[in-house]
């Protein structure tokens, strides 16, 4: 599984309003960079047993830099979106150094990574992502595409 250039940056976003008063915008994350160019995926079991999930897992560290100057001095909620894959076969979980929230997300969904006032021009943190895929549903190597979006009140 290989992230695209700029890791999070080249992914398109789907915009959903959290409520009637909020607006959702893409967050520029072009300054984010993975420590590795790909997440090396390995089978979770050497010899999968019939009826047991044939899953793959891999890890990757990413230096996340979110350009939030457009929303500075406002409050908002930032989400990490995992784009839909061919068969919705990807799950990702992550831990951080504390600036962003830890969490998990499935293909086609988004998960909260920050909530509160935006006081600086950028939000930075390191994410250690663990990616899980259902090996029975994947037919080829697929890029894992993440993006960030913000709901601003």
Image (cartoon, rainbow, N blue to C red):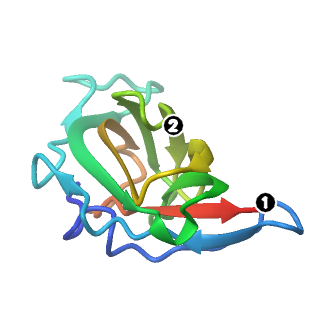
Residue at x 41% of width, y 60% of height: 121
In this picture, residue 76 sits left or right of residue 97: right
Of 32 and 57, the residue lying toward us: 32
Percent position of residue 144, x then y? 33, 59
Residue located beneath label 1 in the image: 18
Q: How many marks?
A: 2
Q: Is residue 3 visible?
A: yes
Percent position of residue 52, x then y? 44, 24
Residue at x 14% of width, y 43% of height: 40
Of 145 and 120, the residue lying toward us: 120
Percent position of residue 108, x then y? 57, 60
Spatial CA span between label 1 and label 2: 19 Å
In this picture, residue 37 sits left or right of residue 20: left
Of 52 and 120, the residue lying toward us: 120
In this picture, residue 78 sits left or right of residue 133: right
Locate the N terminus and report the quarter of the image it occupies.
bottom left
Q: Secondary structure at mark 2?
A: strand
Q: Residue furthest left?
A: 36
Q: Mark 2 or mark 1, which is nearer the start of the sequence?
A: 1
Locate the C terminus and report the quarter of the image it occupies.
bottom right
Label 1 crowding class (10 Å Cα cut-off): few <14, some 14-19, many 20+? Answer: some
Label 2 crowding class (10 Å Cα cut-off): few <14, some 14-19, many 20+? Answer: many
Residue at x 41% of width, y 26% of height: 50
Q: Secondary structure at mark 1?
A: loop
Residue 42, picture quadrant: top left
Q: Are marks 1 and 2 in contact (CB under 8 Å)?
A: no
Checking the image for residue 43, the label placed there is none
Residue located beneath label 2 in the image: 104
Is 70 situated above or below 125? below
Q: Is residue 16 visible?
A: no
């Amino acid at each position: 599984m290989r992230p695209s250039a700029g890791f999070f940056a080249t992914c398109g976003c789907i915009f959903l309003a959290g409520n009637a008063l909020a607006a959702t915008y893409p967050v520029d994350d072009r300054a984010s960079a993975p420590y590795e160019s790909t997440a090396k995926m390995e089978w979770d079991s050497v010899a999968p047993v019939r009826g047991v999930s044939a899953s793959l897992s891999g890890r990757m560290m990413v230096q996340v830099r979110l350009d939030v100057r457009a929303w500075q001095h406002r409050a908002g909620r930032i989400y990490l979106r995992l784009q839909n894959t061919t068969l919705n076969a990807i799950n990702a979980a992550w831990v951080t150094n504390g600036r962003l929230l830890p969490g998990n997300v499935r293909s086609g969904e988004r998960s909260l990574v920050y909530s509160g006032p935006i006081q600086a021009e950028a939000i930075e943190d390191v994410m250690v992502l663990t990616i899980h895929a259902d090996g029975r549903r994947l037919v080829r190597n697929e890029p894992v595409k993440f993006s960030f979006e913000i709901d601003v009140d």
